[in-house]
Amino acid sequence: MPRKIFYALVISLAGLLQATPLLAQVPPHAPGSICFTPNFWCWVSTPGIPGNPCYCYDNNNRAVNGTLG
């Protein structure tokens, strides 16, 4: 039983550490003014309703789908 708890804590901690860098780099912003993709974020030209779809361009100038936040 303690081993299962240990593994659950390790997995949970790994998930938190993986999400932290992305969240730590997001500046203060008005809701709906940033588009979050799976790997990066960008400012949007026209803010919208948080949760609505949006897109950012990657380094190769390809549109990547995301969500307003």
Image (cartoon, grey):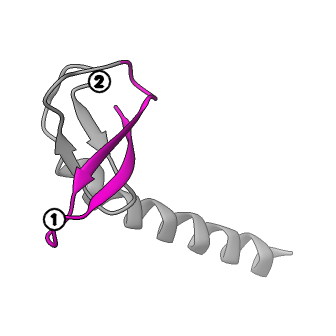
* Residue at 58% across, 64% down: 12
Q: Nearer the viewer, residue 17 or 44?
A: 44
Instruction: Identify the amino acid type marked 1.
Output: Asn
Badge 2 marks a residue whose secondary structure is loop
Q: Does the residue at mark 2 contact the one at mark 1 (Cβ under 8 Å)?
A: no
Magenta part of the chain: 49-69
Badge 1 marks a residue whose secondary structure is loop
Q: What percent of the width, then of the height, locates residue 30?
A: 20, 20
Q: What percent of the width, then of the height, locates residue 65?
A: 39, 51
Q: Residue furthest front?
A: 62
* Residue at 16% across, 26% down: 29
Residue 26 - label: none
Q: Is residue 5 above or below residue 37?
A: below
- The numbered mark, 2 or 1, whose residue comes first in the sequence reads 2
Instruction: Identify the amino acid type marked 2.
Output: Gly
Image quarter of residue 21:
bottom left
Q: Is residue 19 left or right of residue 6?
A: left
Residue 61 - label: 1
**How many numbered circles does the render carry?**
2
Tag 2 residue: 32
Label 1 CA crowd tier, 10 Å (few <14, some 14–19, many 20+): few
* Residue at 22% across, 21% down: 47
Q: Is residue 40 left or right of residue 29?
A: right
Q: Nearer the viewer, residue 17 or 22?
A: 22
Distance of label 2 from label 1 (alpha carbons): 22 Å
Q: Nearer the viewer, residue 44 or 24?
A: 44
Where's the N terminus, which quadrant? bottom right
Q: What percent of the width, then of the height, locates residue 6?
A: 67, 75
Q: Is residue 36 above or below residue 57?
A: above
Asked if the stretch drawn in magenta spans residue 5, the answer is no
